[in-house]
Image: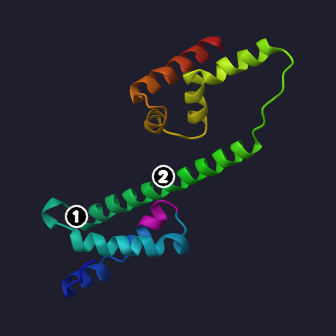
Amino acid sequence: MCKLTTIQQKMIEDNHNLIYWFINKYKLSETEYYDLLALELCYAVAKHDPSRGSLANYYKLRCEGVLYKEYRKSQAQKRTHLTETLESNFTVPIYDDYSAFKLIEDIIDDPNYLIFMLKSTGYSQCEIAKKLNISQSFVSKIIFKFMKNYKEEE
């Protein structure tokens, strides 16, 4: 980051309360998020263009973007942990009847089944589409059809 001018340093001091405003608004842990939000205030002051709006709005947008990225990282870590847990606990059942095994194999090979499994573990439609090498609109249609059929059954 570039060195802040004395004017920018004064702006940071004058707008320090924005950090606490953001913590209170989103009910964040002060000990966990203060440093991150303080850095964002420094970046916001350094990059703020007064002709495009107020510093408070610019700071709010930057912080919301950072929090969203943090949230996505935590969700990805949860999915990774869940996948590792599922893989470590997965056992293949032994069937005497070949037809029962074939039925289960057909269900698991169905791309719709994979879509539902990935969706239920927290993947977004875009992530599912990339993972299965299909379009996001196809994923959306499959999920919509499932929800429609599910509601009709009730």
Q: Are marks 1 and 2 in contact (CB under 8 Å)?
A: no
Sequence-wise, the earlier of marks 1 and 2 is: 1
Q: Is residue 18 left or right of residue 110?
A: left
Residue drawn at x 39%, y 75% as measured from the top left: 38
Instruction: Specify start and end residues of the magenta stretch as a single range.
Output: 22-27
Coordinates of residue 115 in the picture (x, y in percent)? 55, 29
Q: Is residue 148 above or below residue 33?
A: above
Coordinates of residue 13 in the picture (x, y in percent)? 31, 83
Residue 23 is one of the magenta-drawn residues: yes
In which quadrant is the N terminus drawn?
bottom left
Q: Element type at marker 2?
A: helix
Q: Which mark is residue 45?
A: none
Q: Is residue 137 left or right of residue 26?
A: left
The disc labelled 2 sits on which kind of residue? Arg
Q: Which color mode does the image show?
A: rainbow
Q: Element type at marker 1?
A: loop
The residue identified by callout 2 is 72
The residue identified by callout 1 is 54
Is disc 2 surrounded by few (<14), some (14 to 19) or many (20+) residues within 10 Å?
few
Coordinates of residue 58 in the picture (x, y in percent)? 27, 62
